[in-house]
């Protein structure tokens, strides 16, 4: 069994979908689960729908129609005169979404977000599955909600591994008798059968879940780069290709924010010793970067990670007593309750500071609930720079002349919080 994951860029338009079909043709066989993300910038467009709706602006209906129209263009280019069935299937998804928003009464933003943003994956998999069958690639479209189960933490669903593994091992093998599997990334199901999502860019994690549960031979993530780079090539023209790296190094990179794969992806495949390859869907005949237990990492370059839109929260005890373990327990309990991930932390005599991603609702809730016990300051629009395998030269190059708010140094890793 092989697990393939194709991200939004790989299915952004009709030409891209045809390219995915060609890759699948050149890697034949039914023993595959193909995990697909939303097409292009569809997730961003759906977030506009959600935010407009939440603000009470009826323009959300036009935004939703625009999304449908953009997908119609792709369908027409792919299917020519044979569009009726796939258009009907996509329209059904749009109509169901419209009905939900018209009848919804809850103000739970995260709940609304997951019910709406997830349709991007349903639309993309519907189109890709129909097109694959259209060109002779027999496949079965599987609703991820039938076998990926989570708790009720909307936007950050936690996997129920026992239930998920049982479902996947029961559902997938019979379907592969008549074709490979196409399914949605990013999506799970709550105990009440509502849709939840696994975190932004969570399709990688979905692929890892299927890999783990099916004891896959290999997991492959297809991207618009040749493999894993030591820095974002869009920001650093001299970014270097890394041919192989260990699970440990990959976990460190994703923990600090490297965007090449979702942070939760590595653990499931490492537990089963499943290699993960990151390959280019553009130069798909070329070998990519391989993450495995036995990788040779003697020549690891500097790894540079930029996390933008960071927020510095500083908590000071109101009676000016020392920050102690009981205070930290209160703080981290709230962070855990609201799924507010800490990217960096620093303890001082009477204050404790954390750096987190800009998640307005989560931050607002944490600040409100802790304001009785702590004085809280908040700085936004910051950048967190992480350098692994650093030396003084690369540190000076990237931080000289910058406004540094926090700095932490360990044997292998430097983190610097910057105000640009």
Image: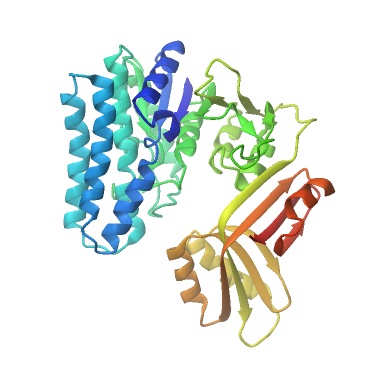
* Displayed quadrant of residue 357: bottom right
Q: In this rendering, would 241 be left or right of 40?
A: right
Q: Nearer the viewer, residue 377 or 14?
A: 14
Q: Nearer the viewer, residue 232 or 190?
A: 232
Q: Residue furthest bottom?
A: 319
Q: Is 81 drawn above or below residue 201 in the view shown?
A: above
Q: Nearer the viewer, residue 318 or 259?
A: 259
Q: In this rendering, would 25 be left or right of 386?
A: left
Q: Is residue 112 visible?
A: no
Q: Position of residue 218 (x, y in %)?
A: 54, 23
Q: In this rendering, would 381 be left or right of 299?
A: left
* Displayed quadrant of residue 356: bottom right
Q: Is 209 drawn above or below residue 397 in the view shown?
A: above
Q: Position of residue 362 (x, y in %)?
A: 46, 64
Q: Please state, as top left, top right, bottom left or bottom right, where the C terminus lies in the image.
A: bottom right
Q: Position of residue 54 (x, y in %)?
A: 29, 61
Q: Is 405 drawn above or below residue 349 in the view shown?
A: above
* Displayed quadrant of residue 311: bottom right
Q: Which color scheme does this rendered protein use?
A: rainbow
Rendered residue at 41%/21% (across/down): 20
Q: Position of residue 390 (x, y in %)?
A: 79, 45
Rendered residue at 37%/44% (across/down): 43
Q: Residue furthest right?
A: 392
Rendered residue at 19%/30% (across/down): 87
Q: Is 410 drawn above or below residue 88 in the view shown?
A: below
Rendered residue at 31%/54% (across/down): 50
Q: Is residue 315 visible?
A: yes
Count of numbered circles in the view: 0
């Amino acid at each position: 069994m092989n697990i393939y994951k194709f991200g939004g860029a790989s299915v952004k338009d009709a030409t891209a979908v045809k390219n995915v079909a060609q890759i699948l043709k050149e890697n034949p066989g039914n023993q595959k689960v193909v995990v697909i993300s939303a097409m292009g910038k569809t997730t961003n467009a759906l977030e506009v729908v959600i935010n407009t709706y939440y603000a009470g602006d009826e323009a959300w209906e036009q935004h939703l129609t625009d999304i449908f129209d953009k997908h119609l263009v792709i369908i027409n280019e792919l299917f020519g005169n044979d569009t009726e069935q796939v258009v009907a299937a996509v329209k059904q998804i749009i109509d169901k979404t419209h009905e939900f928003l018209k009848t919804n009464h809850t103000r739970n933003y995260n709940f609304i977000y997951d019910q709406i943003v997830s349709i991007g994956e349903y639309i993309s998999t519907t189109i890709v599955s129909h097109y694959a069958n259209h060109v002779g690639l027999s496949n079965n479209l599987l609703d991820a909600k039938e076998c990926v189960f989570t708790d009720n933490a909307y936007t950050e669903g936690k996997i129920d591994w026992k239930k998920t593994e049982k479902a996947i091992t029961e559902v997938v093998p019979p379907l592969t008798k008549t074709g490979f599997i196409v399914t949605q990334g990013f999506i799970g199901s709550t105990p009440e059968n509502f849709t939840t999502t696994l975190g932004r860019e969570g399709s990688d994690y979905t692929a890892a879940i299927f890999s783990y549960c099916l004891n896959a031979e290999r997991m492959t993530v297809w991207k618009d780069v040749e493999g894993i780079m030591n820095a974002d090539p869009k920001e650093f023209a001299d970014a270097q290709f890394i041919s192989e790296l260990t699970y440990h190094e990959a976990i460190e990179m994703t923990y600090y924010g490297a965007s090449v794969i979702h942070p939760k992806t590595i653990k499931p495949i490492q537990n089963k010793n499943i290699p993960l390859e990151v390959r280019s869907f553009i130069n798909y005949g070329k070998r990519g970067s391989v993450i495995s237990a036995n990788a040779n990492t003697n020549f690891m370059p500097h790894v540079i990670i930029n996390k933008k839109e960071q927020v510095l929260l500083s908590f000071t005890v109101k009676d000016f007593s020392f920050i102690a373990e009981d205070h930290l327990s209160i703080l981290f309990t709230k962070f855990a309750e609201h799924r507010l991930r800490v990217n960096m932390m620093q303890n001082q005599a009477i204050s404790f500071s954390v750096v987190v991603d800009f998640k307005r609702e989560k931050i607002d809730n944490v600040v409100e609930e802790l304001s009785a016990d702590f004085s809280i300051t908040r700085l936004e629009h910051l950048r967190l720079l992480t350098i692994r395998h650093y030396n003084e030269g690369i540190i000076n190059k990237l931080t000289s002349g910058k406004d540094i708010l926090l700095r932490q140094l360990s044997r292998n890793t430097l983190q610097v919080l910057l105000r640009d």
